[in-house]
Amino acid sequence: YKAQLLQCLQMVSQTEHSVVFLTAFFANKVEHESRHCNGKGLQRQGFSSFDRVYTANQNCGHAYPTFLAVLWCAGLLCSQAPAAFAGLMYLFVRQKYFVGYLGERTQSTPGYLFGKRIILFLFLMSVAGILNYYLVFFFGSDFEIHIKTITGAISPLLLIP
């Protein structure tokens, strides 16, 4: 059991490290646009490319605590491979949202909706893991293998836009 827990922590933590790199990219983009627009650092004036980048960065930053919570719960309580896959897909989707936010308003919508679907998938994985724990605790019925099979089969469906 200890080896399985360590493997789970390793896979999920790799995705978390990718979050750190993506956050650093967004922050770097905000700083670059700020200096490019007015040359004085982080001062926002008018509606410019800096405003769009800054707002997209703030939106992504506000979503990460929820993402990390459901990612860790899904990985620890349910199945680490589908959770890690969904986590990587979420990072890709947030990148698509961020880049889309820099263009027209409608370009960010697909990334936003896709991200919501991935968060829902991770949340449902977490709920399934919690329900399985209580089924084992109260009734002695363990559905872990079935849950892992279902989440493993459903996770590739996240690729469908």
Image: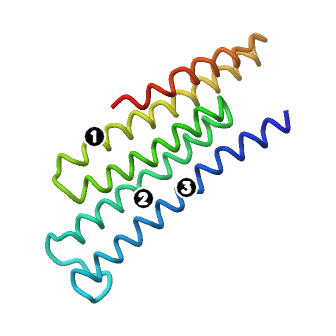
**Rendered residue at 33%/77% (across/down):** 32
Report x, y in % for residue 85.
55, 37
Label number found at residue 36: none
Figure check: 25 above or below 118? below
Q: Kindly indicate the quadrant of the structure image that contains residue 116.
A: top left
Q: Check whether the beta carbons of the residues at disc 2 and disc 3 lie within 8 A of each other.
A: no
- Mark nearest the camera among 2 and 3 is 3
Q: Is residue 136 rendered to the left or right of residue 118? A: right
Instruction: Tell me which label, 2 or 3, sits earlier in the chain.
Output: 3
Disc 1 to disc 2, C-alpha distance? 18 Å
Q: Check whether the beta carbons of the residues at disc 1 and disc 2 lie within 8 A of each other.
A: no
**Rendered residue at 62%/42% (across/down):** 72
Q: Kindly indicate the quadrant of the structure image that contains residue 127.
A: top right
Q: Which amino acid does label 1 sit on?
A: Pro
* Mark 3 neighbour class, 10 Å CA radius: few under 14, some 14 to 19, many 20 or more: some
Please name whichever residue, 34 or 133, is drawn nearer the observer in this view of the structure: 34
Q: Which amino acid does label 3 sit on?
A: Ser
The residue where tag 1 is placed is 110
Report x, y in % for residue 146.
65, 14
**Rendered residue at 51%/37% (across/down):** 86
Figure check: 39 above or below 151? below
Color encoding of the figure: rainbow
The residue where tag 3 is placed is 18
The residue where tag 2 is placed is 61
Report x, y in % for residue 103.
19, 57
